[in-house]
Image: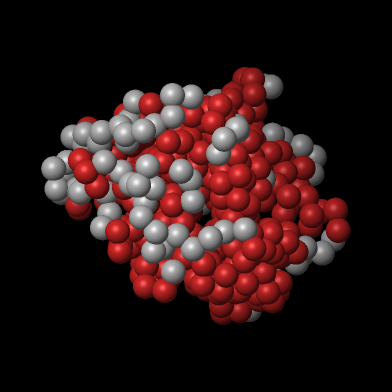
Amino acid sequence: MTGIPPAASSAAPLAPLLRIILAGLIGNVMEWYDFAVYGYFATVIGKLFFPAESPSVSLIASFGAFAAGFLVRPLGGLLFGRIGDRVGRQRALMLSVMAMACPTVLMALLPTYADIGIAAPVAIVALRIVQGLSVGGEYTSSLIFLVEHAPHNRRALTAVWGSWGASAGILLGSGVGALVTGMLDEAQLTAWGWRVPFALGGLVALIGYWLRAGLHAPVVAGHSPSPVRDVFGRYRWPVVRTALLNIGAGVGFYAAFVYAVTYIRDIDRVPEGLALRLNSAAMALMLLVLPFAAWLSDRYGRRPVMIVALGLLASAAIPLFHLIHSPVDWHIALGEAGFAVIMGLVSGGTVAANVELIPAPVRCTGLAFAYNASIGYFGGSTPLIAAALIVGTGNPVSPAYWIAAAATVSLLTAVFLVRETRFEPLA
C-alpha cells in the first residue's frame, strides 16, 4: 500500500470539504457532551442512584459507573473498527452516532434508586456500558475519515476538527450544565434539572445523522479480510505504540476537564456555577490552541510538537494542580488555563500521527482498539482514581502525580518508539 485510492484521496467527488469536516466532528460533540454532562453532575447522580452514608462513597460509585463505559470501549472499537475496515468509514460513522443517542436520552428518563431500588444503579451501569460500546469507534473513525480526505500537507489541520469537536462537546456540556445550574436551585436540580442536559443530547444526534446521511466514502483498497486477527498479530506493534502514545492525553484530558469540576466544587468548596464557568473558559481556550498546534504539526513535524507538549504535561501537572487547589479564584483559573494550553498542544500534535502510525489494512480496527484501550482504561478511570487517591492519601494534590506518570509514559514513547510520519505518504 502506498496510500489511499484516488477516489478517497480527494474530497471533491464525495462532498464539500466543509460538510466532511462537520460530519467528522459532530459525533465527537455528541460523545464528549454526554460524558462531560455525566462527569459534571456526578455528585447528584451519586446521591440519586448510589445512595450511601458517606458522600465520598456515593461519588466514587458514580465515577465507577462512569468508568464502566470506558472499560468496554476497546470492544466497541473492535466492532466499529471492523465495520469501518470491511464495510466502509461512512457506515461506521452512521451507526455510531445513532447508537450513542439512545443511552444519552434514556439517562434523562431513568428512575432513581428511590423509585426502583437496586435496579436503578444496575440500569445506569448498563447504559454506560452500551454508551461505551457505541462510541468505541466514533472518534477514531472520524479522524481516519478526515485524514484520508485531507491534502497531504494539511492532514493534522484537517483531522484536528475531530478533536475540536470532542473539546466543543465538553464545552457544550459545561455551558449547558452552567446554564441549568444557574437557573435552578439545588432542590430543582436534584429533582429533575440534572436530566435536562441528557435530553438535549438527542438534538445533537439528529444533527449528526443528517450531516452523515449524504456522505458516501468508499472502502479503502487492500483492507485486511480479518482486521481483528491482524491487529493482534501482524500489526500488533504499531497498535501498542499508538496506545502508549495516548495514555498521557487520556489521563490529562479527563483530569483537567471532567474531574476538575467536581474537584473544584467539592475539594476547593467553590460554588458549582463558578466551577462550571471556569471549566468552560478553559475549554474555550483549548479550542483556540488546537488548530495552532495542528498547524505546527503540519509545519514542523509530529514528534517535535508531541515531545514538547508531553514534556510540559509531565513537568507542569503538579504545579498546575497546586494552583487549582487554591482558595483564590484567579489561581484556579490560571491552573485550568495551563492545562488547556498544554492539552491543546498534546491533542494537536497527536491527532494526525494516530492515523498515520496504523497501517491502512487495519487502520479503523487498529486505531479504534489502541485509542480506546488508552482512553478507556486510563482516561476513563481517571475520575475514579483521582477521587480514590484523595480519599486514600488525604493529599488533595495526589491526582497530579497520576497525570505526571501517565504523561511520562507517553513522552518516552514519543521519544524512543515513534517515527516521524508528517513527511511520509499515507500508507
Q: Quadrant of residue 220?
A: top left
Colouring scheme applied when the structure was drawn: secondary structure
Number of marks in picture: 0
Residue 203 image offset from top left, x and y in percent: 31, 38
Q: Residue furthest front?
A: 1
**Residue located 54% across and 31% down the image:** 230
Q: Quadrant of residue 208?
A: top left
Residue 217 shows in this picture: yes
Residue 200 shows in this picture: no
**Residue located 60% across and 50% down the image:** 241
Relative side of 379 to 159, left or right: right
| Front residue of 376 and 268 | 376
Residue 398 image offset from top left, x and y in percent: 77, 63
Vertical order, 334 against 408 (above or below):
below
**Residue located 21% across and 34% down the image:** 216
Quarter of the picture containing the N terminus is top left
Residue 365 image offset from top left, x and y in percent: 48, 35
Q: Residue furthest right?
A: 393
Relative side of 93 to 394, left or right: left
| Front residue of 421 and 384 | 421
Residue 190 image offset from top left, x and y in percent: 56, 42
**Residue located 65% across and 43% down the image:** 377
Relative side of 335 to 152, left or right: right
Vertical order, 217 against 114 (above or below):
below
Vertical order, 345 against 189 (above or below):
below
